[in-house]
Amino acid sequence: MKGRVYVAGTGVISAIGNSIPETFTSFKNHTSGVGKVTLFDTVYKDTLPVGEVKASNADLAAKLSTNPNLTRTALLGISAAREAVAASGVDIQKWRTGLISATTVGGMDKTENFFIEFLKDSTRGQLRNVVHHECGSATELIADDLGVNGFISTINTACSSSVNAIALGSRLIRHNILDVVIAGGADALSKFTLNGFNSLMILDRNPCRPFDSSRNGLNLGEGAGFVVLVSERVKDEQKLNPSCIVGGYANTNDAFHQTASSPEGRGSFGAMTKALAMANLSPEKIDYINLHGTGTLNNDLSEGTAVKRLYGDRYPPLSSTKAFTGHTLGASGGIEAVFSIMAIEQQCVFPNLRFETPIPEIDIRPQLSFESNIKVSHVMSNSFGFGGNCSSIIFSAT
Amino acid sequence: MPVYIKGMGNISPQKTWGDDPLLANPSDYSGSKLSCIEPDYGQFLDVKQLRRMSRIIKMGVAAGTMALRHAGVTTPDGIITGTSFGCLEDTGVFLTKLIENNENALNPTPFIQSTHNTIGSQIALLLQCQGYNQTYSQRAFSFEHALLDAILELKENTDQHILVGGVDEITSYSHSLQKRFGIFRDSSSSLNLLKSGGDGTINGEGAVYITLSGEKRKDDTVSIESVLTIYNSPGNDIKEKVRDFINEASLNTSAIDLVLLGKSGEKEGDADLERIASDLFPTASLGAFKHLCGEYPTASAFALWLGARIIHEGKTPAIVLDRESGRSMNNVLIVNSYFEKYHSLILLRAC
């Protein structure tokens, strides 16, 4: 395994914007995307806020000139992946190109409606609404849209999925199996996940307050984030001028509980420590940490404890961007990777909205305002999930 | 770089666990689906753990435990799982309750256990394994990519044990739903599926885990040389890719002793696979496996288990063979096809 892996382009769609420039404007203006459910039918429409992408399936399909009957996960993925490929300037047909996506809901947004008819009578329900149920199907649709017919893969390690997709892409390039990898993730909001997290009693009825002592749960979100990774050779031959590299990554398991994190944050501590070791960086070299920071009592205390174990009181600027976007589940690692790269490209850090009072046990004070003109060379992003899956990734300026 | 098989566990529609000789008494099924022959899970899990687990999680955990015990490994360094459908039973339960209760008063347990990574993470939790943990879900590449990842992990650090598996389940919902796509036939004898003509396949399921290491020990008998996935390619390209794949392993096609074809009973797809085999491997033995395990996205994991057992034992059960060459079993190639859109190749060698 050798050589550097460069980030040649990024693309994103979430509650705070349908593109990179729109997203950056929302960050600058401290504009959160969390609000009422408007695009699907649920009894919690008025009580559980979410971070919806501000476009219906029909709007997305019209903008992308594609089939409006695709799953929302695929539509979101196509939007972000196309933006990333266009921004990269890479001719993806010229190289051994792969697509590695991540998703947790796949086509559930369609399946859950199909099931209403299907439950009444197993011969009913339109099959076109369930044909894209599998996680891998969204990836096929994105690959077919981009014209990628080499390596395609999908990872589902719950909310850490997309970081693992970017890590796998980097490894396939470093093992000289692929030259170019479009990697990230996509997840749409669904009644299934909204009710799932609600049944666990970890959804806040107000806009979420990550890392605040009064935090009371997360808000779900949706979206997609992709990066285009390239080898040294592709960078040179295509005369690209990438702003950063994938410096390090790590995947560990907390092995504590199916849904709760260990009090000492052993999985998250392990992921951050191993990613730093791979990037050959000491913790103080990190200029900004994009926290997992869901806003649940358990995650923020556990993650914060791991950050304190690593840094003591001298931690770098850090924030959870989930108060902007909501928790986009399998897409979060991809979306937040794009944000992390944006921090390096724009030399800025993002605010942790709605923070007022530190959690007493850890006393961590996140970044409160959007700040630019500061030196950001190394960014670490955390993504943790159900099943104890913990992943961290580090991007470094070239 | 080859990786070495240290242990295997397989729960399938055949009796593939325990001390039985390889496929000694093949089970024949009628209808359009096969169901796993499950062990007594009390050997692997206590009653309290069992009560909470759905069938796919029990099958996965048990197959994983078999593979580790067989290898003499207590805790692996990483756990990598492939599953296309994930935990369908829990997904179905939660979805049904959500609709029936109009989104009220839902039990969170099936939701928690509905995510695809539940199988791999339950194994990690039981073993307190904090190492690398990954789950792939790319239809009929799910197991292949788990295997590829394991090979990469072992290349990066050979002195590790990685538990890698492929797991998928059939539920009553999934079967009645998939049937509506017209892909299954009603068969009077599953063992005759590939010989009886007609069209359509039979639904299958299974859980296979394998313990792998990059370090060879003297009692190892089978290595995995390489794995390749081919997405959405025309037939001629596939033949060329098979040839390249063998050549990249520094072999000629004539060195292949047995080809296990992923024929499923779909007439056209099966004919394509047979053409590749007769063009490239005219002197090899030919076999098949989906009449034993059924068609499902991670059926290639069953094929890997079968190929490894054949190499280990030096003979191929008659129920597997379409054409016997009389060759000794050193190099076994698995050529899988899943509804002709997904093809994969796995090369096993005696070591």
Image (tube, grey):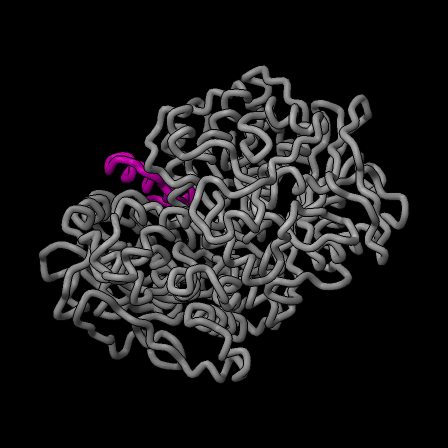
Residue sitting at x 28%, y 58%: A118
Q: Is residue A93 visible?
A: yes
Q: Position of residue B197 (x, y in %)?
A: 9, 57
Whether the magenta-drawn stretch holds residue B244 is answered as yes
Asked whether, in this view, residue A350 is left or right of residue A168, the answer is: right
The N terminus of chain A: image quadrant:
top right
- Quadrant assignment for the C terminus of chain A: top right
**Residue B107 drawn at (x, y percent):** 50, 68
Residue B249 percent location from the top left of the image: 43, 45
Q: Which residues are magenta?
A: B228-252
Classify A327 as above or below B57: above
* Residue B309 position by quadrant: bottom left
Taking the spot 36% from the left edge, 41% from the top edge, the residue there is B230
Asked if one can make out residue B351 in the rendered structure from this viewpoint, the answer is no
Q: Judge by depth and name the residue closer to the eye, A77 or A32.
A: A32
Q: Position of residue A61 (x, y in %)?
A: 38, 29
Q: Residue furthest left?
A: B197
